[in-house]
Image (spheres, rainbow, N blue to C red):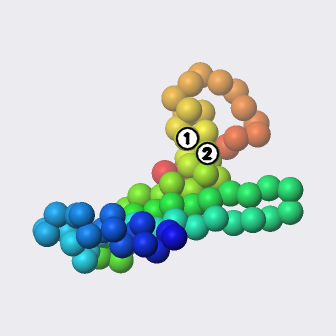
Amino acid sequence: MWSKLKQLTEEKFADSVKNRVEIFSTRYNKPNSSSGRGWITIDGIEIVNFSTIKSGEIYRCIYHEATPTICKKAPRSSG
């Protein structure tokens, strides 16, 4: 079902990006938890990552660096 939705969506892209932009989605199931990942590529290079775990890590670091908090559990990002 996902492959058909992917195909239908990508067919609607503008001619200037058709066959260059791709969308992806997957789901990981582990005991007692599940997570997913979605991403978009242009010319095979990942430009957007919708990973539930990775997104949480990124936004936690942004919040941590933007607020005057002392937190020993969340080190500041290096980038």
Residue at horizontal 14 percent and vertical 69 percent from the top = 15
Residue at horizontal 46 percent and vertical 63 percent from the top = 39
Q: Nearer the viewer, residue 32 or 1?
A: 1
Q: Is residue 16 something that shows in the picture? A: yes
Q: Is residue 30 left or right of residue 59?
A: right
Residue 12 at what x, y percent from top left? 24, 64
Q: Nearer the viewer, residue 47 or 28?
A: 28
Structural distance between the alpha carbons of marks 1 and 2: 5 Å
Residue at horizontal 21 percent and vertical 72 percent from the top = 18
Residue at horizontal 76 percent and vertical 39 percent from the top = 73
Q: Is residue 41 something that shows in the picture? A: no
> Are circles 1 and 2 on residues that touch, CB within 8 Å?
yes
Q: What residue is shown with label 1?
A: 59
Q: In the figure, 50 relative to 25: above or below?
A: above
Q: In the figure, 6 relative to 58: above or below?
A: below
Furthest-top residue in this view = 68
What amino acid type should be assigned to the residue bearing mark 2? Answer: Gly
Q: Nearer the viewer, residue 40 or 74?
A: 40
Q: In the figure, 52 relative to 11: above or below?
A: above
Of the numbered discs in the image, which one, if any, rests on residue 56?
Answer: 2
Residue 44 at what x, y percent from top left? 35, 77
